[in-house]
Amino acid sequence: MNTTTTATPWPAASVLDGAYRKASWHLIPFIFVCYFFNYLDRVNVGFAKLEMLDALQLSNTVYGLGAGIFFIGYVLSGVPSNLILHKIGARRWIAVMMVAWGSLSACMLFVHNPVSFYVLRFFTGVAEAGFFPGMVLYFTHWFPAQKRGQVMALFMSAIPISGLVGGPLSGWMLQHFSAGQAGMAGWQWLFLLQGLPTVLLGVGVYFYLNDGIAQARWLSTEEKAAMQAALASDEKQRQANSSVGQSFSDVVRNGNVWMLGVLYFCIQMGVYAINFWLPSIIKSLGFQSSVAVGWLSAIPYLCAAIFMVWAGRSADRRRERRWHVSLPMLMGFTGLMMAANFSSNVVVVMIGLSMATMGALAMFWSLPSAFLGSAAAAAGLALINSLGQIAGFVSPFLVGWIKDATQSTDTALYILSSVLLLGAILVLRVPAKLVNR
């Protein structure tokens, strides 16, 4: 009789779970804070607008173009930046990016005419371009696909949290510095005080982050081996499922990559409508105090933060990705329609804006990272992100132009809600076998 016993998998599973907990606690809180300021520096112009336009005699069209021109620089630099990150490592390149964009964001206080506004916004977009796709790529070096739904939800909850905290904070800054301390207006202090922390965090990135599992001194040898084995298994499955080749030209020729880029564009059209125009929409409801606008703008972001964490856990538990993207986008469509159709009812508009914010920040990034192999991920993720960020130019400019032409944002909200509906339908065309892991 064969008395050989098979070793139980539980000890290895226990080691792996412990390693993931360590990695989550070591990486996610710090990266969360970095992304918090990344997003705050990107969209705080929406609050600065409340004072800056009158102070500089700028139109809504100029503001919309300036808010959107950021994304021209962002799109042009996205793929090259991510390829540099892939070559020299996340720690050094993310540190460089954060110091650069934090400095440029602070320099927004020197804006004095449309040209200076456009130039600074453009180069801030260039500096920020590789951060988000770089972080998505970075997480693929630590967590397998079945863990990344929760990880990405926690990471991306920095977007609604930046609105939740940044709204009241920005409103307070505008009011507190409205007297013009040190010869600067409130909107100038806003850019300075929200840009400098990013510079300090960029220095911290260089000393705190590790480029990968092998460099993590805070993991034991056994934990490193367990995580690397899990990643190797995940990579093998991604390669088996993926139709994307290894080169950049293979990525560019792949239809699924382009379809996901179009889908992300649809999502971002809703995201940036909320980010750049939420304070103005709330102010148009009759709230003139910057502090009141700030606190009310926090409500949709609070709802979105709670919803995103729940959706990420649900997606991982059910091993289902597509409906966890499509259904929230339908919520976004419904919310924007409510805000447009009941623009005189404060309660209904706030409910609609909350639904729109929850729905626009859909769980998208669990889709491409589930099937792009490591060799294709750097270029693929950056290309998808760049295609989506084109909406960052189109959306605010469209809303600003329509606002100047009609003195209302209702028509723009109808258009943007239709784009979200298109995206909700499009996501169901993504093959389930590629992403449902």
Image (spheres, helix red, strand yellow):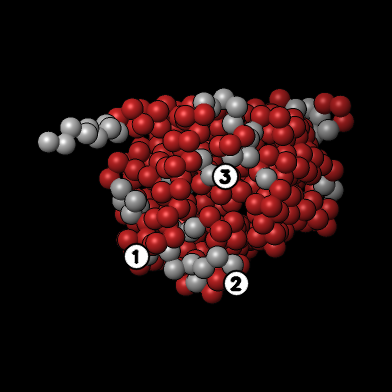
**For residue 294, which quarter of the picture?**
top right
Cα distance between the residues tagged 3 and 1 = 25 Å
> Residue shown at 48%/59% (left/top)?
372
- Vertical arrangement, residue 204 with respect to residue 117, above or below: above
Q: Position of residue 348 (x, y in %)?
A: 38, 44
Question: Could you tell me the amino acid type at mark 1?
Answer: Pro
Quarter holding residue 20: top left
Give the farthest residue toward the front: 1
Residue drawn at (30%, 48%), measured in percent from left and top? 319
Name the mark nearer the viewer: 2 or 1: 2
Across and down, in percent, residue 421 comes to 39, 62
Label 1: state its secondary structure.
loop
Q: Which residue is mark 1?
A: 431
- Disc 2 packing (10 Å; few <14; some 14–19; many ≥20): few
Nearest to the observer: residue 296 or residue 68: 68
Of 317 and 415, nearer the camera is 317
Viewport quadrant of the N terminus? top left
The image shows residue 352, relative to residue 226, as above or below, that is below
Q: Residue furthest left?
A: 1
Residue sitting nearer the eye, 411 or 230: 230
- Picture disc at residue 249: 2
Residues at marks 2 and 1, CA–CA distance in whole angstroms: 22 Å
Instruction: Name which of mark 3 and mark 1 comes first in the sequence.
Output: 3
Alpha carbon separation for disc pair 3 and 2: 22 Å
Dot 3: what SS? Answer: helix
Q: In terms of sequence position, does the residue under pointer 2 or pointer 1 come before the other?
A: 2
| Residue 138 tag number | 3
Residue 292 in view here: no
On the question of residue 243 being in view, the answer is yes
Report x, y in % for residue 352.
Answer: 40, 47
Residue type pointed to by label 3: Tyr
